Amino acid sequence: MQSAISLSLSSPSPIARSGVANTSNACWPMPRSLRFCGLRREAFDSAASFDASSLRFVRLNLQPKHSSLSKVSAVLKGNGAPSSSGFDYDLVIIGAGVGGHGAALHAVEQGLKTAIIEGDVVGGTCVNRGCVPSKALLAVSGRMRELQNEHHMKSFGLQVAAAGYDRQGVADHANNLASKIRSNLTNSLKALGVDILTGVGTILGPQKLKYGKGDSGEKIITAKDIIIATGSVPLVPKGIEVDGKTVITSDHALKLEFVPDWIAIVGSGYIGLEFSDVYTALGSEVTFIEALDQLMPGFDPEIGKLAQRVLINPRKIDSYTGVFASKITPAKDGKPVQIELVDAKTKEPKDTLEVDAALIATGRAPFTKGLGLENINVQTQRGFVPVDERMRVIDANGKLVPHLYCIGDANGKMMLAHAASAQGISVVEQVTGKDHVLNHLSIPAACFTHPEISMVGLTEPQAREKAQKEGFEVSVAKTSFKANTKALAENEGEGMAKLIYRPDNGEILGVHIFGLHAADLIHEASNAIAMGTRIQDIKFAVHAHPTLSEVLDELFKSAKVKTKTSLSPEPKSLLILQWLKLAHLVQLLSQSRSRRREVL
């Protein structure tokens, strides 16, 4: 697995991009590919003394004479200064979702004159029709589930009357949250002076595009660099008729216009699982329809088995596996929703269901139509824009399209909002002259059921397949929430954490958690993978007691690594300091030789 931190003695790219001078490297060579998995470099620049992760140099008195005051000034004043390269903008982003927003903010911080084109509303799918409103509904379902669990409440000595809910009030909570976050994102862009251009963005040619709406006219602009960040839409398979009332996608479900007595959910991935949590808490019966032979196919099998025992078996949920919903007809004329099922392998008819509603949760499709990709000879692959590991767009001949990038759901590398943002930040690093490659194996994912599921890196089958190909051993360590004081205090001891690692060198290959606040706990593991931290180092980290974080503490401590010694933080710091001293001396020697040649 590629470490997320890479030190290179090569100097930074000499090409000045968008008129932004690389002043931080003016006096001596900085490591060119210092990578923090999409974390903003500025987050590591506030320490007053040396820190191994931030590579500060105060103790050595090696601070460059020319500080980045111009970049700071640009951020304080708003958008970057007018482009000196002859373009209208240094950077234009098509799509103001979470990915485009993250890229725009980082671009302004780097001094780029930036614009973002949005044909709908700021925030994209995540804020308006995805992660944000769904978490509002899940917050309600979590509280309802707890209040409805009489045994759970009695264990605390609490007596609670029958819990009820107001459907419109629940829907309003989700809608109000989305509106608030959307307003926050819009205001943050305006505060930094990012130009928000309303309309549909279309690429006309290299570094040239148009935006606008048909009734209000279109305008042509130029940009030194362009980022496609158009996101995705719900995927609806053939044969399924969506009416938005009884046959719905996640877009419709988040409005919670009604709570059906019986709803079929097509797909048992993240989206399907979360909505099953919501609907069963609000009183619905759920039937899963899954094309593969098992439910929750995208999760680590062991975690999926435990999650099914807790999240599905005890609830009003049944399921069909190994079948396709070949045809779904909305309710009409007093008839219920009709679902025709066929065998996924033989395509033979299996059964017909009649339910009150059907939710299509079969995934998402990239929204890339109308971008004008044909104007730059780019062909999509199943709708996705082809890119390399640096998010640079690849044309039909396999060549890179200069100055054009694609991030987020539109490229299909990892369809998560925070992955899109990390990719956007990575691209901005590149267009400002700094090489940056995002380690996608360090990006965590979570399913916000009750309890939650989270993961980062490889599943156990994936790790064993990789080990067989590359010739190394794989070991697994596990801990239970039942041994955690905080979890027991909450009467939430159901859960486990699983570590997949290399026993020969302590490399973390994957971590999977099922239990209380698993989505929050996963970040210690994801950051360890991003920073290249080995188990023999992280097991000495101290965790507050009693906290849920001790689940991870025990997990890392239980791993058996054959290599007992590793560089502790202090020797690592000394090694980096010595390397920096050497780099500085080499640069001074080079400058001295250049001066002598000039004199001669």
Image (tube, rainbow, N blue to C red):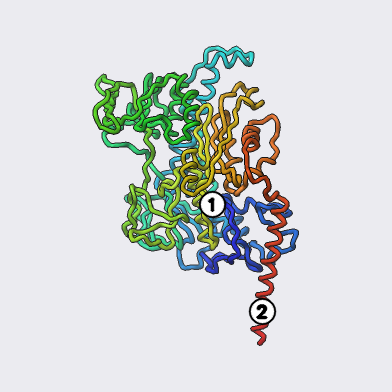
Q: Is residue 142 above or below residue 522?
A: above
What x and y, as percent, mark residue 2?
Answer: 54, 52
Q: Residue 347 versus residue 518: which sits nearer the camera?
A: 347
Instruction: Check disc 1 and report the residue beneath it.
Output: 2
Nearest to the observer: residue 346 or residue 233: 346
User: Dot 2: few (<14), some (14–19), or many (≥20) neighbours within 10 Å?
Assistant: few
Q: At label 2, which amino acid type do we have?
A: Arg
Residue at figure coordinates x 46%, y 52% from the top left:
116
Q: Secondary structure at mark 1?
A: loop
The kind of secondary structure element at disc 2 is helix
Q: Residue at x 55, y 18 (%)?
A: 147
Sequence-wise, the earlier of marks 1 and 2 is: 1
Q: Position of residue 459 (x, y in %)?
A: 49, 39
The residue singled out by tag 2 in the image is 593
Disc nearest the viewer among 1 and 2: 1
- Compared with residue 594, is residue 581 higher up or lower down, i.e. above or below? above
The residue depicted at 29 percent of the width and 21 percent of the height is: 336
